[in-house]
Image (cartoon, grey):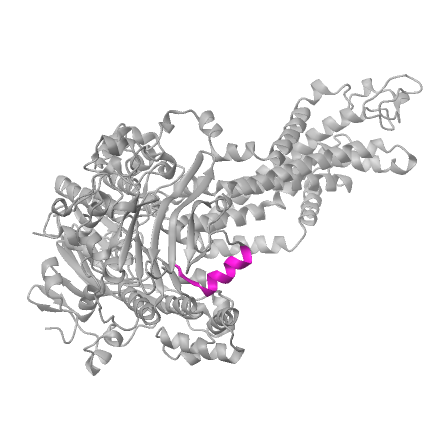
Amino acid sequence: MTTPVLSIRNLSVEIPTRGGVVKPVDGVSYDIAKGEILGVVGESGAGKSMAGNAVIGLLNPPAHISAGEIWLNGTRIDPLQGEAMRRLRGKEIGMIFQDPLTSLNPLLTIGDQLAETILTHLPVSRSEAEKRAVAALEEVGIPGAAERIDSYPHEFSGGMRQRVVIALALCAEPSLVIADEPTTALDVSVQAQIIALLKRLCRERGTAVMLITHDMGVIAETADRVAVMYAGRLAELGDVRDVLTAPQHPYTHGLMASTPLASLGQRRLHQIPGSMPRLTQMPDGCAFHPRCPQAQDKCRQAPSPDLADGRASCWFPMMAEAAE
Amino acid sequence: MNAYVSVKALTRIFDVSKPWLNRIIERRQKAFLTAVSEVDFQIEERTTYALVGESGSGKSTIGRMLVGLLRPSDGEVEVEGVNLATETNADKVAEVRSNIQMIFQDPYASLNPRWRVRDIIAEPVAARGGETEGLAERLLQQVGLHASDAGKYPHEFSGGQRQRICIARALASEPKLIVCDEPTSALDVSVQAQVLNLMSDLKDDLGLTYLLITHDLTVVRHMADRIGVLYLGRLVEEADPKVLFETPKHPYTQMLLDAAPRTDGFGREVEPSQGEIPDPINPPSGCAFHPRCPIATDLCRCDRPVQRKIGDTVVACHHAT
Amino acid sequence: MAETSIPLSTKEHDKGRWQRFRESDFFYAFKRSPVAIVSFAVVALLVLAAVFAPLIAPTNPFDPASLNLMNGFTPPMEPNAFTQESFLMGTDDQGRDVFSTILYGMRISLFVGISAVLFAMVLGIVLGLVSGYFGGWTETIIMRIADVQLTFPSILVAMLIFGVAKGFTPVEYRDQMAIWVLILAIGLSDWVQFARVVRGATLVEKSKDYVAAARLIGRSPWAIMIRHILPNAMSPVLVIATISLALAIIAEATLSFLGVGAPPTQPSLGTLIRIGQGFLFSGEWWILFFPACTLLGLALSVNLLGDWLRDALNPRLR
């Protein structure tokens, strides 16, 4: 069996606040294999971005990893600090954020930024790095790459900027890319272009991708496997087709049913009552039980089971017939 | 059926020039942005009209002109048969204005964080010197919150609950028309369904008319009775939802429908459309969509297409059939 | 609609203002900052001492009847050679108790400082709101005046205004009016910061949809500015007000030190320092030392409090 590119084991993130310690990520485990796209989906506050930030060591203090392990290509990386982490971040892990403007330095030309990144992480000469920068821009479909290499980020449109960010994330040939809501700020027609680009590049290079998004449609079309998060915990993890068409966790089921497409022909949309609990007001037992249509006494008392021996973290997973 | 709202050749041009000193130093011309260009549509009473478009399509600008937050540069807005720009009878205008309310996109920015929910909801009535005793409590219950929530501040509520408060405020002055500007795009999927359902219920119960402004075609399929698709400030297609989704006539509408990610589209490989939305300060000549259009011809590059009726669909395209 | 079936939070709205304050992030941050607590304590102590000066001060330094010239130049904590009286901080050349003059002087300093800041604040808020909300020519004119004023040191502006205003005051009222002229001068030299900050905040708040909602309802611009925008723009104003208070107290002291401020009949801390510096090299150090220390303590504490306030009220730093 080959080692997965990324392996997260029982990861927990804690933030001490004056009201007590909150856990935005609570005992999450998943793997991403070479060339695989794992979709991490959840609503705002589900901890999906926090888990991604933990992997790249970008947690804002006082948030910190309180338990668990993160392995990258067989090396444990969660204890890494400072320089070692920075080196790893650019070389082995590429990052794509929601707002391309925040990941580009507005004062440097994109050519400089690309060449800089290549020089830092690959043993090549300056001229070679510049050549590669142009190639990287061509690869992400920027027309006239050779001329635009001396442009500044603000001279690009939103979609083009996100292409530059992708070029920047991939130019050091990382083995893992973390894309945190890469298309949320973009228009639908541009979003499709970016998703297609990301998919093609990662397939060609065998890069593993952690795709964090709230959009079930993007997940369905892009991911191989999907991890559904709810209130810091993994609710369901599995093959994207299985999870989306026959969800076993009532939350996934509700989420799928409430997308407008799923309710076509009905007058009302399916809705999940209530909203996600605040981190400071977590209910006892399974975090989803107050909104769950089939919660029982056990759900109110015992925390939901770990995923180890099942697809859904639920005491009473919905089997195929229930999900019909 | 009579048209409750009638918009004719509505145009809005923004002056986006730099300050005059910079213009002189940099020898620049004044710059104008045509956000909305000769848009016509009508909204029947007690129906939902949806305006769909991506960023820069002018959809929010139209909404803001309708409620009177912006003045049209040209064209007219008629509500209840009253032309709001030219009507000289101030009472009549005030009367019509009080029948129009708005719900905004960002439920975090649209509630004053320093005010209690009770005062926020009652403000439309209090501002006109109306009776507000128990009003907020009643409305809160109507939108599915507790009467006791009236004494709280906005920060104590989640995004979905805040949007309910916004709806309650919009209902306070008993309006007939509510302009909803992206009412659910800041909300999570499961909460979005709650808010959309609430809006449907209220429409049935109170006989409301909606103008629903959104970038998300899937949302309007449920809610709308009629859909208008905007591109770069121009109305390119207008049709009933079923017709629009099954037989889109305009290439832009077709592209939008293709590009929207689908929850059942596993491993779908769409050939994505090329290009991006052009700069609205220098829009393309002729049909604004021609640089991205797969069926564009020389005609499209020269002449701006006029609206044509094909069946029940109104479309602005030279080649639509 | 079953959203309501889940209790959101505790019944926070049942609590009184005081209790909500005690549970607020603001009070929490205060409790955890030793600097804030100490400087608040110093400021509170000094303000209370100034307010209750007539009760605390051993003598009334401005009551000629209580003065004894024989007590002149008594060093601190030492009995006077002639009268055997002892003074905590010594006495000046006329036998006035330095401790008492400081208490009374602080009253003048604080009164002038606070009044000047309030004046500057009201003026700055109004002009800032108006220029931010209406924009256009109104904004251009107001902000250009502000820019011009900023190119001069504010103490210079204050001196100019002081001089001009004094010229307009009839001679017989000059001493009486000096304090008010001082307030006017310092206030007018200080409104720019308030106007700039309020204008900035107004521009931000104006673009938010709750303002659009209020406009939609038909609220007048003034109602929107005062009831909607101002409460949301007050945090930075409070910070500036606190820091300005320290500056205003120092400005007043500087003016008085230069002899153009508070008259000797109503000496402020600055006047006391001016008087005291004449005796510094003849050995009577205490006449200068104690007023100067008081001024330093007061200005420093207010400033530290302002710095802390800025951090505590800045949502980005939380």
Q: Name which quarter of the figure residue B195 lies in.
A: top left
In the image, A22 versus B233, the foreground residue is A22
- Does the magenta run of residues contain A59? no
Q: Is the residue A317 above or below the residue C8 in the image?
A: below
Q: Is the residue A232 above or below the residue B213 in the image?
A: above
Residue A17 lies, in percent from the top left, at: 46, 37
* Circle count: 0
Residue B278 in view (yes/no): no
In the image, the segment drawn in magenta is A82-99
Residue A202 in view (yes/no): yes
In the image, A258 versus B238, the foreground residue is A258
Residue C61 lies, in percent from the top left, at: 78, 23
Q: Is the residue A256 above or below the residue A199 in the image?
A: above
Residue A46 lies, in percent from the top left, at: 33, 46
- Rendered residue at 63%/39% (across/down): C304
Determine the residue located farthest toward the front in the rendered image.
Answer: A1
Q: Is the residue A129 above or below the residue B140 in the image?
A: below
Residue C131 lies, in percent from the top left, at: 48, 51
- Rendered residue at 37%/39% (across/down): A279
Q: Is residue B26 left or right of residue B67?
A: right
Determine the residue located farthest toward the right in the rendered image.
Answer: C81
Q: Is residue A74 left or right of residue C4?
A: right
Q: Is residue B66 left or right of residue C191?
A: left
- Rendered residue at 27%/73% (across/down): B274
Determine the residue located farthest toward the bottom in the rendered image.
Answer: B298
- Does the magenta run of residues contain A92? yes
Quadrant of the drawing holding the N terminus of chain C = top left
